[in-house]
Amino acid sequence: MTEGSVLKKKKIMLCVTGSIAAYKAAGICSALVKLGAEVFPVLSPNALNFINPLTFSAISGKKAVSEEFINEERVLHVSLAHTVDVILVAPATANTVSKLACGICDNFLTTSVISSECPVLIAPAMNQSMFLNSAVVKNIEALEKTGRYFFAGPSEGRLACGEEGAGRLADQEDIIKKLEELVLLKNDLNGKKVLITAGGTREFIDSVRFISNLSSGKMGYELSCEAFFRGAEKVVLVSANKSIQKPFGVTVCYAESTEDMMSGINRYFEDSDVIIMAAAISDIVPRQKYDYKLKKNDDIISKLNFKENINILRLLSEKKKQSQYLVGFSAEFGELVENAKAKIRDTNIDMIVLNDISRKDTGFGSDFNEVFIITGKSPAEKIEKNSKRIIARRIWDNIIKNSVKFRNDL
């Protein structure tokens, strides 16, 4: 056993699918056990054509599961998936990869993986023509964009069919190294309490009319999903958008107006280690809200009177503790980095994330984003266009990297 391995005492679900490379999974299982990991073998029905589950039971000391309906005192495919630290699918066939991408739960293996919330490492093994098939390529890309699925290999070489090319199961050492990286990733925020805001506030003029903005709240939601995914003790999302599905494991507090959002923030701010203000707070609010619908013939224009809204980010920067890390978002029409830098200069804000809202393919309402990370300590770092979940991961990477005090506490 390797005393210093990050896999020691970690729970790993080893999923084996119907590939000729299934025999190599026994070696991976043995290596993980030697590193001190607790391995739970799961085999797909087709894997039984290539290797006996008794092999994995003997190596791991855990009963290998292959039947879907074996629940006794608990729903095993959920309880097991929610217990492990990481899942490894090795080897992964084109069939299983495609099922996971499409959410198909037709056996214990796919049901367990899809119900999980931990990192999933997929090690494909298939013929090169299958690996390069456009449908399989799209499914792999779709899984990667979720931020929950990672890939190891495949490598190139001689394939089972006698052909040469990409499709061989990645080397055992490479797979284990990637697993170690994912275990560390899952523990990045261990013990930390996170507070995130999302969406565009609504400031009502009368009982039916309001002013708002185009913020969908998707970026904030993905930031909260990533925080939970990386092991945060508690994640609170104060959201102005009720239409997005509630993230698993996240406490959601809905807030319609700036006043509501400030109230939600104040409830959790003192106890939070990291605060990310991703919400688009309205810059102006009506001086008076009418509790009835204003009529056109009631001189509606003369009754419209606005004032500057409170700056929640600035207020938080004034009262944040030294141990807290505060991140703000800046929506700019263009890559106006200097404007964003001005917001962080001479304040107690640790980081500003700049969104270019002039583009139609990123930002407000889009599933994609492209941002600049500004800390005031180094030149702005551009994060190229990607899914908002991957952008959320890069933002969290920077929070951990740029805060020495925060990183040392992890």
Image: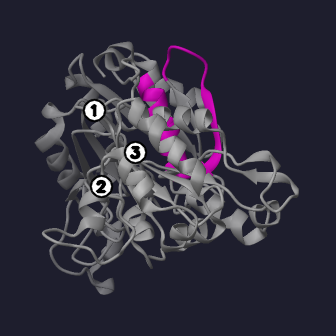
Residue beneath disc 3 = 59
Q: CA distance from mark 3 to mark 1?
A: 30 Å
Residue 405 seen in this snapshot: yes
Alpha carbon separation for disc pair 2 and 3: 65 Å
Label 2, on which residue?
A: 285
- What is the quadrant of residue 287 in the picture? bottom left
Q: Are marks 1 and 2 in contact (CB under 8 Å)?
A: no
Q: Check disc 1: other Cα within 10 Å, few if <14, some if 14-19, many if 20+.
A: some
Is the residue 294 above or below the residue 93 in the image?
A: below
From this view, report whether residue 367 is shown above or below residue 352: below
Look at the numbered disc 1 and give the secondary structure of its residue.
loop
Residue depicted at x 14% and y 33% = 271
Q: Nearer the viewer, residue 287 or 271?
A: 271
What type is the residue that disc 2 sits on?
Val
Whether 392 is among the magenta residues is yes
Q: Give the residue at mark 1.
A: 190
Q: Quadrant of the C terminus?
A: top left
Number of callouts: 3
- In the rendered structure, which amino acid carries the disc numbered 1? Asn
Magenta part of the chain: 375-400
**Relative image position of residue 345 (x, y in whole percent):** 45, 18
**Nearest to N terminus: mark 3 or mark 1:** 3
Across and down, in percent, residue 23 comes to: 58, 53
Q: Secondary structure at mark 3?
A: helix
Lateral position of residue 132 relative to residue 346, left or right: right
Which amino acid lies under the numbered mark 3 shown in the image of this protein? Ile
| Relative side of 387 to 410, left or right | right
